[in-house]
Amino acid sequence: MPDTIKLGVSSCLLGNNVRYDSGHQLDRWIHDELGRFVEFVPVCPEVESGLPIPREAMRLVGDPDNPRLVGRRSGEDFTERVRGFSREVLPRLADEDLCGFIFKAKSPSSGMERVKVYTEQGMPDPKGVGIFAREFMDRFPLLPVEDDGRLHDPRLRENFIERVFVMKRWRDYLESGSGLGGLVDFHTNHKLLLLSHSQKHYREMGKLVAAGKEYPLEDLVDNYQRLLMEALSIKANPKSHFNTLEHVAGHFKDDLTPDERQELREILQQYKDRHVPLIVPATLINHYVRKYGKEYLARQVYLHPHPVELHLRNHV
C-alpha cells in the first residue's frame, strides 16, 4: 500500500449537504470502500463560489462547446462566478498532488460528460461538460477522471482505480529524483500492465526507455508520462487480459508440473470463455510466482495493481 493517495471528489458524493436542495448524493462505495485507501479532497464549485444552500437549481444553456450556467427559474447567469472560482482553486488543487478526480454525473457545474445543454427552444442536447469539470480537465489533461455514474460499470471502475494507483507510483518516481535508472525500474514493473492495455504503446514505450540516454531527461519523462496515461486510458478487455496471462504463463514453462500446467491452462480457458473473473487466474499465477520464486513477475504491477479488498477484479 503506497503512501497517502489524494483524490478529488465532488463534495456531495461524500454525503455533504451542499446540493441546491440542501441534500447530498452520498455514494457508499466511494465513501465507505474507496475511502479506506485514499484521502479525499472534496470540492463543490457552486457553494465554494459563494452560492447559498439551498439555492436555485441551475442548468447549462446555449452552445454545448461554450455553454452558460443559468438559474432554471430566474435565468440569472452564474457562469463567470463558477468559472472564476474554478480558475482560482485549480492552482491550490495542483498543490494537493491529486491522483485523480471523481465528478458528479450530469451536474451542470461538475459533470465530466453527457450534461444536458438546453437550446433557446428548451430542447436538451446531452453533449455538455460542467463549467468546473471542463476547467479542471483542461488544466490537468493527464489526470484520471471519472464520474459516480460511470463507476457503477465494473470495467470502468477497475480501470479508473488502476490509473489512480499508477499515477501515485508515477508521482513517487518523480519525487524520488532517481532519473533514468528510476524510469527504467518504473517501466520494468509496469510492462505487463501496459501490455494488457495496448501492445502498440507497450512497444513504443519500451523503445523510448531503451533509447533514454539520447534524450534530455525532462523531455523523456514528459513523453513517457503522456504515453503512460494514454495507454492506460485504453480499456483492457478479456481478450487483452488473456493474451497477457498467456505471456505470463510462458515464464513457468520449465517449472510447472504436468498437473499444474494443465490446471493453469484450464483456468485461463475458463477466463477466456467468461466463466470466471480475472481474480481467479491472477490468484493462481500469484501462487506460482511465490512457489517458484519468480522475481521478475513478483515485481509486476499487473498482478497486484490495487488493494484486493476493493474486489475490483472479481467482476472483470
Image: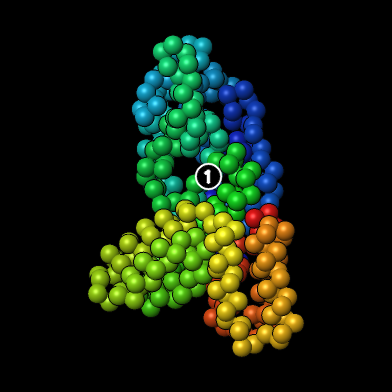
Residue 201 lies, with reference to residue 30, above or below; the image says below
- Say which of 182 and 159 sits in front: 159
The residue labelled by disc 1 is 146
Give the farthest residue toward the bottom: 254
Give the farthest residue toward the right: 259
From the top left corner, tell me how far across and down residue 131 is, in percent. Answer: 42, 31
From the top left corner, tell me how far across and down residue 280 is, in percent. Answer: 71, 66
Residue 186 lies, with reference to residue 28, above or below; the image says below
Q: Amino acid at mark 1?
A: Glu
At horizontal 33% and vertical 70% (from top left) the residue drawn is 208
Mark 1 neighbour density, 10 Å: few (under 14) some (14–19) many (20 or more): many
- Say which of 124 and 186 sits in front: 124
Q: For the residue labelled by badge 1, is the local secondary structure a helix, a strand or a loop?
A: strand
- Say which of 98 and 266 sits in front: 266
At horizontal 47% and vertical 57% (from top left) the residue drawn is 232
At horizontal 39% and vertical 20% (from top left) the residue drawn is 62
Residue 170 visible somewhere in the drawing:
no
From the top left corner, tell me how far across and down residue 294 is, in percent. Answer: 59, 83
Q: Quadrant of residue 180?
A: bottom left
On the rendered image, what quadrant is the N terminus found in?
A: bottom right
On the rendered image, what quadrant is the C terminus found in?
A: bottom right
Residue 2 lies, with reference to residue 233, above or below; the image says below
At horizontal 67% and vertical 66% (from top left) the residue drawn is 269
Query: How many labels sit on residues?
Result: 1
